[in-house]
Amino acid sequence: GAVVSQHPSRVICKSGTSVKIECRSLDFQATTMFWYRQFPKKSLMLMATSNEGSKATYEQGVEKDKFLINHASLTLSTLTVTSAHPEDSSFYICSARDPRLEPYEQYFGPGTRLTVT
Amino acid sequence: KNQVEQSPQSLIILEGKNCTLQCNYTVSPFSNLRWYKQDTGRGPVSLTIMTFSENTKSNGRYTATLDADTKQSSLHITASQLSDSASYICVVSAKTGGFKTIFGAGTRLFVKA
């Protein structure tokens, strides 16, 4: 099946700094990528939908100036958490839609564990 | 309101036993229902995908059923293994112009030796 990678898998940063998370589709071109956040023992919460070459669409309640999303190429989307705060500590997961498949099929990355100290 | 509810929240079974996880949804207009397995600290992995016309789909020891009339789905795991310990997430998509996807909270399964 299709593979989606994320980097880094774990990151620790200090409050006030910014951290960038990368999401790559390894064997297909993803016109659409999604960013999710997951708290312990909770399900995934969609943060934003990223379309290649255009601005991301953010879900209600997600601060677009704090969570900067860039989808500069068909295989790469990045999520930058700016001015990180301890409450931003979470598990961030991206997914990518393979345009060769049904529009609702998506492949998830392995996730990035962010800890803000 | 579009919702996906899963039960039980958590489940402990002995290795080799079978189990069934439930998913009820109120998503409309229904497009498809997917079951994912998520190991701790990992991303979800797709197990099955079912559209409106499908009422059962198997993937190895995993068998999903769908009753579109009652808006219920189940995931049956046969002859459980220790590696089946994970969260199982039911995801339902509604076709509304594009696709709106609603995630269930998941069922945490623990398989013990």
Image (spheres, rainbow, N blue to C red):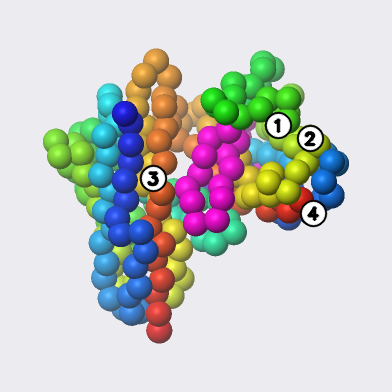
Q: Residues within 10 Å of mark 2 (few under 14, many from 20)?
A: some
Give the residue at the far left of this rendering: B69
Task: Report the amino acid beneath label 3.
Answer: Gly
Q: Secondary structure at mark 1?
A: strand
Cα separation between marks 4 and 2 = 14 Å
Frontmost residue, A106 versus A50: A50
Q: Residues within 10 Å of mark 4 (few under 14, many from 20)?
A: some
Give x and y (percent) for residue A112: 67, 50
| Sequence-first disc among 4 and 2 | 2
Please give the chain letter of the residue carrying mark 1. Answer: A
Q: Are marks 3 and 4 in contact (CB under 8 Å)?
A: no
Quarter residue A54 falls in: top right
Residue name at image x 40 percent, y 80 percent: B112
Q: Secondary structure at mark 2?
A: loop
Task: Report the amino acid beneath label 1.
Answer: Phe
Give x and y (percent) for residue B70: 15, 39
Residue name at image x 33 percent, y 36 percent: B3
Please give the chain letter of the residue carrying mark 4. Answer: A
Q: Secondary structure at mark 3?
A: loop
Q: Residues within 10 Å of mark 3 (few under 14, many from 20)?
A: many
| Sequence-first disc among 4 and 1 | 1
Q: Which residue is mark 1?
A: A67
Q: Which residue is mark 2?
A: A82
Mark number displayed over residue B104: 3
Q: Which residue is mark 4?
A: A117
In the image, are marks 4 and 1 on the same chain?
yes
Q: Are marks 2 and 1 in contact (CB under 8 Å)?
A: yes
